[in-house]
Amino acid sequence: MSIFKSSIAVLATACLAASAQAQLDPPVFTAGPETTTRFNVNATSATYPTGRPDATSYAPVYVTSNGGSQLRVNQASVGIRRVGSVATPAVAVTVEVTILEMTFDGTNYNLGNVIETFTQDLAASTTSLTQVVSKSWGDADPAVRPVVNLQTITNGANGYAGFWVGVRFTGDGSSSSTNGWRVVTEPVLGRSNNNFGINDPTNTGWGANFYFGTTVGTDGVTRENQARFSVNVNGLVTDSVTPPPTLVYGKIFETGAYWLPTDALDGVGSRWFYNSAFVAANVGDALTPNKVSMDVYRGGTALTPAPAIGVELALVKMTWDAVAGTYGVGDVVATQTFQLAASETAKTDRIDWTWSNPATAPVVALNTDNAGNPNIGGMWVGARFLGDSDALLGNNGPLTGFAPAYGGSFNSFAMDNGTGVLTTYTFNPAYTWTPAATGVAVFYNRPSRFMVEAFGVVGPNVPPPPACPADLNQDGVVNGADLGLMLGAWGPCPSSPCAADLNLDGVVNGADLGLMLGAWGNCPV
């Protein structure tokens, strides 16, 4: 069972707070917001008749953010419920809290890098109360506070980013049912959902997932039930972090799955496959790119290196068939080939195709013909692998990297079968999210294993000026035919500019004739 598939759907009512203000003092917990239930994975229960010594429970924690974000933590708190009495005291226990980054492999959320771990000893208690296990970095230099790379692949640009907070009991009292975590107060910045997962050290994956469901209130609004494992994390979210050029991929922003055309389809590794990249655009707009990026996963080891391979990228116009309701591949605008060396490590190489001068960048006319997607313009970014048969069968493939910041592929791609017919492949089902504030379902795509980013400027598609302006009939030579056209247009231009007005002063006269005579003959290639 995948961990927290329900997390995405339930975010609509998770009531994430937008404030990113530091809360430097631990919150004060009282009886009011608490429940009497609690959970301790290490204790004997119906779920775990013998308990799970040293197992850790993980709460998915979400903060409001945009794509490519980090969280600089000021404070992290967990409420620990103690059910004690004079006759049966709650035993002493040590609580370990861990802050980890979150990964996403296209289907499951998994554990990433450990960012911070702290512990706190709780003394035995003869009363029932909730104690706060908390650590604050609020008085420390911001440069030394923990920084979490937030998981934003799944929905960063749409409003949230995730990480994990893990809790486990250690010491002699770790298996006592008098201790357990439970709901405390509503967090200021980041909070767990109403579910958590158990990572069991006796196996290699998640031991169990717990989800407490939703309840329809008297006002008819569906809300998340309070979880029995809730955390409070405060800090500062930094949005839209630009990955540095020296960033080594292979950690939080990617998955271990990749895809090759030879994996399970027609076995032809040199065929083109196309990503649909969409940006906000009006009819007649075009994209002048400054960078197009693609992530290529290298599944190499010392024993089985990822082979050297060539990767060719292409910017391609998109067509629309209104009758069939499908996009097609149009003219190729520009191509570029890149070479990737063999690799003995598993990593992702990022291919950056850049244009520093807008005047030399290609101009891709965006397709806006689909009436069902108004104000959206589309193009294709095509890719194919180049190399010998061994390289094409090797362990290289496209892979999700950072969530796109401008124009990105959907969770699908199309492959040309060699006859001009496109076959579409989708990796994961889409999902909908219905925000409580609007009650309107919003459609989102899950990330694919072939994702590109397109950066640039969208604007009206203005044809470039002719390379040889005096060649009025554009036949490659300036001669008597062009002179005749100029003489026919002699005088003030009816509109500005006009083709024969070579110096763009609004009138065709002797100055323009002089420019034509100076350009007489074949146009430069």
Image (cartoon, grey):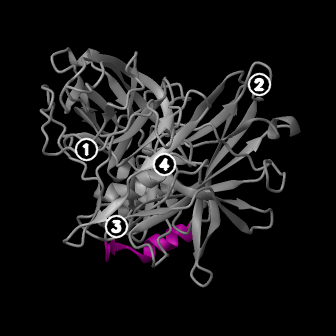
Residue kind at label 1, given as amino acid type: Thr
Going from the N terminus, do you reach mark 2 or mark 3 first? Answer: 2
Residue kind at label 2, given as amino acid type: Pro
Going from the N terminus, do you reach mark 1 or mark 4 first? Answer: 1
Give the residue number, with chain letter if any, for mark 1.
Answer: 36
Q: Position of residue 174 (x, y in %)?
A: 40, 23
**Furthest residue in direction right, as rendered:** 389
Give the residue number, with chain letter if any, for mark 2.
Answer: 305
Residue kind at label 4, given as amino acid type: Ala
Q: Which of marks 3 and 1 is in front?
A: 1
Residues marked 3 and 1 touching at CB (< 8 Å): no
Going from the N terminus, do you reach mark 3 or mark 4 first? Answer: 4
Q: Position of residue 414 (x, y in %)?
A: 66, 60
Q: How crowded is mark 4: few (under 14 residues within 10 Å), some or many (20 or more)?
A: many
Give the residue number, with chain letter if any, for mark 4.
Answer: 454
Q: Residue 497, labelled with which disc?
A: 3
On screen, residue 238 versus residue 394, left or right, reads left
The stretch of residues the image draws in magenta is 480-495
**Is 427 colored magenta in this rendering?**
no
- Measured in 3D between alpha carbons, the distance from the residue under mark 2 to the one under mark 4, in whole angstroms, is 30 Å
